[in-house]
Image (cartoon, grey):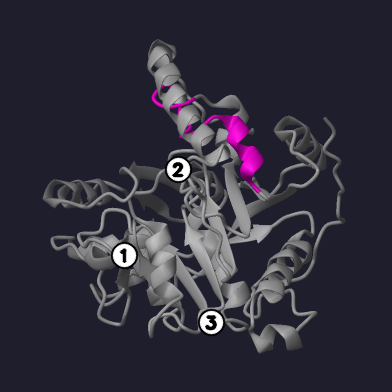
Amino acid sequence: MEGDLIYTNKHLRPLSWLYGLGVGFRNFLFETGVLKSHSYATPVISVGNITVGGTGKTPHVEYLIRLLKDKTNLAVLSRGYKRKSHGFVLADDNSTMYDIGDEPFQMKQKFPDITVAVDKKRTRGISRLTSGAAGKDIDVIVLDDAFQHRYVKPGINILLVDYHRLIIYDELLPSGRLREPAGSKDRADIVIVTKCPPDIKPMDFRVLTKALNLYPYQQLYFSTFEYGELVPLGDLGGLGSLESLATLATLAPYHTLLLTGIASPEQMRQDLERYAKDIHPLTFADHHQFKEKDIRLINETFSQLPSPKCIITTEKDAVRLRMVKGLSDEVLQHLYVLPIRIKLMLGQEEAFNKHIIDYVRKNSRNSILAKSKDDYKPKDSDYSGDRPRTISFRNNR
C-alpha cells in the first residue's frame, strides 16, 4: 500500500526542526528575490524529487529521452554524483563512470547520439551547453535531479513521488527522508507518483489524488515499472546453463539473487516475486562502489543458493559491476541485467507526451517539431496501446 516504506525516528525530530528552519529560510530567499532564479531561452525540463533517493529518476529521464531524441537535439545535464572529476564535463565516447558518474554514464551508453554533460553548478552547465561549439544547436535540456537547485527556473518542473514513500506522510531529515517540507510540491508543474503496483485499483488512484491535494495548475500522473528482457552482464563470462533465459516468465524454476545498490529496491523485489521461485535480496547503498569484501559476499551468497539459480541486477548496478574484479566464474555465468522502463498508467501517456512536446515546440526553433504536431508517442515505445479508460480527477481546496 502507499506509504508502506516510510520509517521515521521521533528522537531526531528536534534536529529535523532545525533542518527545516534552514531549508525554509533558503526557500524564503528565493521567493522574495534575494536569491535569483535564472530562466533560459532554451527549453529546460527538470526531473527531481524532495526525497533522499529512490523515486526512479533515471527511468523517467530516459522516458523523456526516448520521447524527444528523434525530434530534437537533446542534452541531459546531471550533477554526476560520486564522480571523480570536477566542474563541467561533456561526455564523449571515451568518458568513464568515474568521469561523469554511473547514471549519466548509463544514459550515454544507451543513447550515444544525445549530449550528456555533468556539472554540480547547473547554471554554469546550462550556459556551457547553450554557448560555443559544445551546445550551439541544443533544442532542449533535461535536468536530472534538480528540484532543489532553485538557481535554475525550468520551463517544466517535474516532481517524482514514490508510491511507497509518499511525501505527505514522511518527515524532514534526519527524522525522515525529506529534503524539503512536503509543501514544496507546490513548485512542481507536474507530479508523478512512481513505482505504483501494476494491479493498483481505480479507487486507490482517487485516494492518492485527494491525499496529494494539488493545485489546479498542477498535473498529476501515475507510473509503474515495465521490465525488458534479461540481458547477460557482458563479456565478463560465459552464459553457462542459462543461455536460454530471456524473459521474466522463464524465472519460475530459479532461486534468484536480487543484487542491488539503489536507494529503494522494494518495488522491484515485489515485482520479481511474481515470477521467480524465490527472491534473495542482497542490498547495498545507493551508488555503492563495490569493494573486495562486497565481491566476496556476492560470491559466497550465490554459492549457497540451491540450483537452478541466477542473479539479477539493475542497469545502474551493472555499470559499476563491470568495473570490478574477483567475481567467481559461477556468478559471471549466471549474472543478468534487468532493464527497467516506466509506463504511464490510466491512459495518461498521450496527454503527458503532448504536454512535453508542446512546451518544447513553443520554445524551440527546431523545425522537426513544427512538422510533427501530432507525434505524441515515443517512437520506440514498447507500450502495446491497450490502455484502461481514463479517470479524471479534480483537485479541490
Q: Residues within 10 Å of mark 2 (few under 14, many from 20)?
A: many
Q: Judge from the rendering whether residue 327 lies leftward or rightward of residue 166; answer left or right.
A: left
Q: Give the CA separation, mark 2 to mark 1.
A: 18 Å
**Callout 1 touching callout 3 (CB < 8 Å):** no
Residue 319, disc: 1
Q: Amino acid at mark 2?
A: Ser
Q: Give the CA separation, mark 2 to mark 3.
A: 32 Å
Residue 73, disc: 3
Q: Nearer the viewer, residue 17 or 162?
A: 17
Residue 16 falls in which quadrant of the image? Answer: top left
Q: Over which residues does the magenta segment extend?
A: 172-188
Q: Main secondary structure of the magenta part?
A: loop
Q: Position of residue 32 (x, y in %)?
A: 56, 37
Q: Position of residue 368 (x, y in %)?
A: 67, 88
Question: With respect to residue 175, does 225 lie above or below?
Answer: below
As for residue 180 lying within the magenta part, the answer is yes
Question: With respect to residue 237, does 262 lie above or below?
Answer: above
Q: Position of residue 346 (x, y in %)?
A: 78, 54
As helix, strand or loop, the secondary structure at mark 1 comes to helix
As helix, strand or loop, the secondary structure at mark 2 comes to loop
Inspect this view and state whether residue 9 appears: no
Q: Nearer the viewer, residue 266 or 208?
A: 208
Q: Quadrant of the N terminus?
A: top right
As for residue 385 lying within the magenta part, the answer is no
Q: Amino acid at mark 1?
A: Val
Q: Quadrant of the C terminus?
A: top right
Please give the residue where the numbered disc 2 appears in the rendered image: 264
Q: Position of residue 42 (x, y in %)?
A: 56, 71
Residue 69, disc: none
